[in-house]
Structures are given as structure tokens and as C-alpha cells.
Image: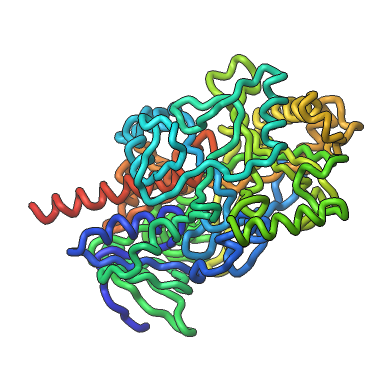
Amino acid sequence: MAQQDQFDYVIVGAGSAGAVLANRLSADPKVSVCLLEAGPADRSPLIRIPLGVMWLTKDPRHNWLFGSTPQEGLGGRSVSIPRGKVLGGSSAINGMVYIRGHRADYDAWAAQGCTGWGYDDVLPYFKRSEDNGRAAIDDAWHGRGGELSVQDLRDPSPMDHAFVAAAEQLQVRPCPDFNTPEPEGVGIYQVTQKDGRRHSTGAAFLAPIRARANLTVMTGAEVARLQLENGRCTGVVLNRDGGEAVVGARAEVVLCAGAIGSPDLLLRSGIGPAAQLKSAGIEVLRDLPGVGQNLQDHVDVMVIAKSRSTTPYGISVRALPARALDTLNWITRRRGMFASNMVEAGGFVRSSPQEDRPDIQFHIIPGRKSHRGRMVEWGHGVSLHTCVLRPDSRGSVTRTRPEGAPDIDLGLLREDSDLIRLSKGVKLAREILRQPPFAPHGLSEIIPGDHVQDDAALADYIRAQARTVYHPVGTCAMGTGPGAVLDPALRVRGVDGLRVADASIMPTIVSGNTNAPAIMIAEKAADMIAAEARAARAA
């Protein structure tokens, strides 16, 4: 086994969190940082072009393309789980929606013993990253001058405005800013774009600092396992050129491989539930029952309608001139359809007045998404996603063998309470699409379809069509109880020199898209790591 150079910090995963952490830690010229990414550099034009998201979700070069185990709540179906495998990670292949969640999400973490993770604690870290381009945005809640460009969509579709107007017909209020402490209502999302192009964490946090002498970025560097010696993590073992090589860490190894990758790497390294590891043929180095447990994701289902008008994005003979102009518009001005993140508008609503805060989120696509698994469908229409924000169902990431992909059970609709909430959300989604602002476009529902009317039929439809909205979290949860994998400083319990800093650390899922929270987690982790290092030097 070849021994490579030692670094002070080794970060596994150059995604939404890892790229941020590498930027912040390497800002201190006294320390050396190595950032490891299993995927390639982020050079593909599909990453830069926002509309490229349509292809990136199924692109094996930039995507791990995980799949779930058969889901009992979905009638035994398996669902796809796209995860970024490239510099920038999932921020390089996602829908670019910038959402933080609700104040109560973070205050709940603090109430569960995660000291320092309440809303007022984490708000400064959200603001530090952000460079918000809206002149009238409230600076009490937003940052300017950070690395991450957050902007209004340059050319929102007319269908977005129809959606907002239609929801107003049903007394759902407009929400001009979804990143205030208590967002509720509908509107057009802000996105992580810069001048009409995707602004991933690779572009925002890595590209400007690649010349730092104390930062080494390695792509194509897949980590096989952690190296542990006498209860301390001293580095990682890479699969390299048909053999193995070690990258050593003098101070810490930090896992930023995401809610699938981070727990799986712990399991492969012998850190996790002892009985499971033994059954999988993995030597137990640290019995930690919570590793891979507590998996949460936003269960989602769509209502899809076709349109008689060509205003929605789509492919048809009548729309060919418009598509040609879209291409020219992108090439010359970085505007138009190719600057679309596709999930342009949406919002947060309550499934019933008894809910203390919104528990349903909408994402509307101003185009007709395929309900048959195709990349695109001929024609025009709209597709309205509905998801449950705080599901009761739980899943897991486990191993039944030492090698190969992990077993990912998302647990979708395992609890009937999630089905009930989702059914209420879908009913509202269908009503929104039937309101007068959509009338000029001549919408007619494709799925669920007019034959699906009673609660039983709707429940059957949801179980047959629901899937994830790609927000897995919680599998290396921080906390103070027996199931916690990490302490509130994100240190792995019982293993020195090892930390986790990504969406897997969430004890409970946030009420919204998870990319911005993952960036915040890395910002806060960087401060904690630097503070501990200063204290150690002063001791």
C-alpha cells in the first residue's frame, strides 16, 4: 500500500459542503488541506447551462445514480436517487433552488440538545456564504458579497405568474421572499445562478482558490475506507491505479460525502451497528448504532397536465421557431429557456389549519414532464410537484456485504400520516391547476387523470407514482441521545480525529430544499474546527 503525503485536514467529498469547507480551512496558510472527490472536474457544459439539469439527473459520469431498495409504501417499487459525483457534488446537478427552511426546524435541533444550532445561531452562516443579487432584498435575512451567487430568475415563465395568481384564487398568499424565518405562500424561487449560469459550490468556492499553495484537490479519488489506529482516524485509503494508497491526516478527516456516502464510508470502515457489520463480514472497530439510521427524505408526487397553448416550455412543430430563438438567446445573452432551472416557482402551504407551519411544498415546472420515464415528451403542459416537508417515515443506509453499493431504504410512505398529508397536498395542487389564470392555456390533466376522484383512488395513485424529491438527510445525526452518531460539534462519537459535515448530520429534515442548509453546515463546521485548532495551539 503506497503512502502519500500527509496533510493537516483531509476532506472526503467536494460537494455542497466539502467545497465550502475546503475554502474556509485553506484560508489559513498555516494549515494544509486535501480535498478528495471521486468524480471528475466540473467542466461539462451541461453543468453551466441551467437547463442541463434535465440530463444531469441521469448522467452516469457526474452522478452516482443510486437506487433504493423496494419500497413497501410504494407497492414494492424502487426509485432512483441521483447524487452528484463531480466537483460541486449535488450542487452541480440539482435544481438550483435556494431555500433554507423554517426557523422552527433549527430551533427544534437546539431543543433536542444540539446546542448552537438554533435559527439565530445558524443565520449568520447562511448570510456569510450568500451574495444576493436582488437590490430590494431585506439585509436582515440575507447576505451580500459572499461567494455563492443567489439571484432572481432572469426570465421566469409566464406559467409561474399564472401559478401564483391561481393559488391566490384559493386564498394562498404570495410570498416574495422564501428565506425569511417563517416562509409561507407561493412565488418564484431564487436560484444559485450567476449571470444566467449555474453557480455550484465548485464554481463559487473552489474555482477562485485553486491556486492556493496549501490546498490539494484530487479528482477521481474514490475512498475505500478510513484508516483507524488506536481509536483515532489517521487518514483515508484510496482505490488508486489498481491498488491502494493512503492519504494521511495530522489533525482531522472530515466526511462531506453526503447522506448516502458518509454513513456508507463509516460502515465500510467498521464504524456502525455491530450486529449489522458482523453480518456483512466487516470487522467492528466502533459499535455506533445510529450510523445509517434515521434516513429522511421529502416524498413527492406530480400532477401533470397538457396544454393547448405553446406558452409552456415544450417541443412541437408550432414551437420550433421559439426553441430556435431560445438557443440564440442563451448563446448571446444567457437568457431564456436555457437559463431556466425548470422548477422555477412553488411555495409552502399547510395541509390543514391545525398545522403550526407549512407542511407541504410545491415546485412547478413550466413544461410537461414525462410520466413514462422519458427525457422529454412531445407537446406542452405544466407539471406540479407536491412534497411532504416533515415526513414521519424513516429509512436507512445499510450494508449486507463489504463491497458494492449500499442498501438504501428511503422508507417512503412507510407511515400513513405521510400519505394523508400528501393526499391533501395533491388535492390542492389539482385545484390550483383548475383555476381561471390557467384557463387561457387549455390545461387538461394527464395524471392522476379525471378517473381518480375518491380518496382510495388518489391513495392508490400516490403509492404508484410517488418518489423522492432528492433531499436525503439524517444518517449521521448529531445529538445527545443513544442514537446520535455525532456530538453537536460534529465529531464522531468514540473516534478521535473524525468529523462529518454535510446533510447527513441533520437530526430532522428541514422544511425545504436542502442544498443551502448543507452549505451552512460546512460554514459552521469550519468555524468549529478552526476554533478547536486555535485552542489546541494555545494549550
Is residue 396 shown above or below 127? below
Is residue 385 shown above or below 373? above
- Residue 194 appears at what percent x and percent y? 49, 52
Q: Is residue 340 visible?
A: yes
Query: What is the residue that sits farthest to the left in this orientation?
Result: 539
Q: Nearer the viewer, residue 384 or 416?
A: 384
Residue located 56% across and 26% down the image = 175
Q: Nearer the viewer, residue 451 or 303?
A: 303
Q: Nearer the viewer, residue 503 or 331?
A: 331
The scheme the figure's colours follow is rainbow
Say which quadrant the N terminus sits in. bottom left
Q: Is residue 222 left or right of residue 321?
A: left
- Residue 146 appears at what percent x and percent y? 36, 47
Q: Is residue 210 left or right of residue 533?
A: right
- Residue 85 appears at what percent x and percent y? 53, 64
Q: Is residue 290 visible?
A: no
Is residue 367 shown above or below 328? above
- Asked where in the image residue 35 lies, by quadrant, the reply is bottom left
Residue located 83% across and 29% down the image = 439
Q: Is residue 33 left or right of residue 343?
A: left
Residue located 20% across and 64% down the image = 29
- Residue 244 appears at what percent x and percent y? 42, 80
Residue located 33% across and 64% down the image = 209
